Image: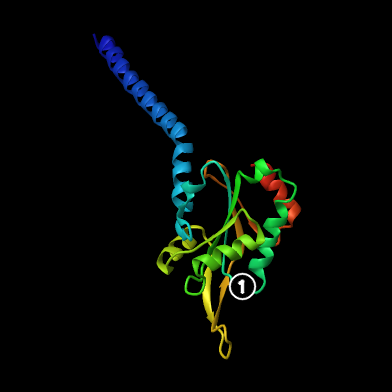
Amino acid sequence: MAQDSNLKLQGKTMKKVINYLASALIAIGIIFIAKPYIDNYNDKKQYDFTVTSNSGDLTLDSYKGKVLAIYFGYTFCPDVCPTSLSTLSTALNGFSKEQLDSFEGLFISVDPDRDKLDALDEYARYFHPTFKGATSNKENLDDIVNRYKTYYKKVALEGSSMDYSVAHTSYIYIFDKDGNFYKKVDHFTNPEELNKVLKTLL
């Protein structure tokens, strides 16, 4: 009798262990399957934005089906912005019309007080016809910049007719045709290297 009771107890214990292991395996499987979707959602949340151009509001979803390159700067920038935008423009050399139709560059100004929409767009298109200019209010720009882990700050220029400059980091953020963040490149990247990056997406 005692032996039968022990066997029954062992059987119940074994069932509990099996049920626990099965539940754990199912939970691990769900996490494994869901992780790419969670990561994708987090990326979209981090890199989404709403800015205003002379043709209306733009979001990350506005560029679905196109490779997107984003650069933060301002039109009064004396060197880094023109250099970076020129690098991106040069990197587009050699792509076919069909490939360029699948690409857009977005220049987001962090100086909305001076960069008016029409002038901003004209400035961006000066570097390449696929580039567009946009900006927003300071509160929204600060939120976008923080999520992109970049930086800008007004710097007073005493005795200058410009009144102030804007110190800022200099990165080009590249997204694939599904709106997924692909790569961040700095302004020291040469056009040939950037061309290779874009070629993998276009």
**Above/below status of 96 relative to 189:** above
- Give the vertical position of 74 relative to 158 (above or below): above
Q: How many marks?
A: 1
Q: Nearer the viewer, residue 163 or 132?
A: 132
Could you say which quadrant of the image residue 187 lies in?
Answer: bottom right
Task: Give residue 99's quadrant in the image.
Answer: top right
Please state if 39 lies on the left or on the right of 182 as rendered.
left
The structure residue drawn at horizontal position 65% and vertical position 57%, both measured from the top left corner, is 128
Question: Which residue in the rendered view is the most extreme toward the bottom?
Answer: 159
Q: Nearer the viewer, residue 178 or 161?
A: 161
Residue 126 % position (x, y): 64, 63
- Residue hosting label 1: 77
Is residue 14 left or right of 136 when viewed as pictured? Answer: left
Asked which quadrant contains residue 88, the reply is bottom right
Position in image of residue 197 (x %, y %): 68, 47
Tell me what residue is drawn at x 53 percent, y 44 percent: 180
Q: Residue 106: image x %, image y %?
A: 56, 56
Asked whether the viewer can see residue 187, the reply is no
